[in-house]
Amino acid sequence: MLFGTVSGSLGVLASVDKDTFDFALKVQNAMNQVVQGVGGLSHEKWRSFHNEHQTRPARGFVDGDAVERFLDLKKDAAAKVAALAEVSAEEITRRVEALQRVTH
């Protein structure tokens, strides 16, 4: 599903198989531990739902932008993410690049 926001952003919601989802979630969680968000704001807070009554974390979704940022990491940071995700940096790179080809 392709969507647009009132601020002009475009996004894609795509279904993936469980193995791909689990892999991407592990990488996203590892990225959240290694890479600091802009202004010190965590990625989880950035992507959570907020209104005047409640704040709820995003569930059942993986942020492709966060996973894709792995490709921009320096070697030492990529190695830390790979160790936390328990997947080699080469495997992460290969699978993230394959996901890019599907969504771009």
Image: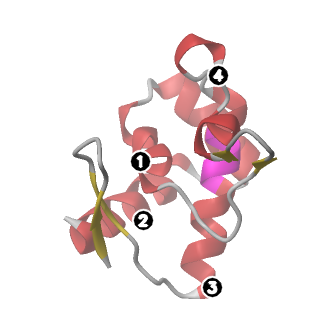
Q: From the viewer's perspective, is 75 left or right of 77?
A: left
Of residues 13 and 70, the one drawn nearer to the viewer in this rendering: 13
Q: How far apart are marks 2 and 1 (CA)?
A: 14 Å
Q: What stretch is highlighted in magenta?
A: 27-31
Task: Choose mark 3 or mark 2, whichever is in front.
Answer: 3
Q: Is mark 2 on a helix, strand or loop?
A: helix
Answer with mark 3 or mark 2, whichever residue precedes in sequence.
Answer: 3
Answer with mark 4 or mark 1, whichever residue precedes in sequence.
Answer: 4
Image coords of residue 63 (percent x, y): 51, 55
Q: From the viewer's perspective, is 94 left or right of 44?
A: left
Q: How far apart are marks 2 and 4 (CA)?
A: 27 Å
Answer with mark 3 or mark 1, whichever residue precedes in sequence.
Answer: 3
Q: From the viewer's perspective, is 9 left or right of 52?
A: left
Image coords of residue 55 (percent x, y): 77, 45
Which residue is disc 3 drawn over? 18
Residue 35 part of the magenta segment? no
- Which quadrant of the structure image shows residue 84? top right
Local crowd size for mark 1, using a 10 Å CA cut-off: few (<14), some (14–19), many (≥20): few
Q: Is mark 4 on a helix, strand or loop?
A: loop
In this picture, is 75 found above or below 45? above
Residue 65 circle label: 1
Q: Is mark 1 on a helix, strand or loop?
A: helix
Answer with mark 2 or mark 4, whichever residue precedes in sequence.
Answer: 4
Task: Choose mark 3 or mark 1, whichever is in front.
Answer: 1
Which residue is disc 2 drawn over? 95
What's the amino acid at mark 2? Arg
Which residue is disc 4 drawn over? 41
Task: Choose mark 2 or mark 1, whichever is in front.
Answer: 1
Q: Is mark 3 on a helix, strand or loop?
A: helix
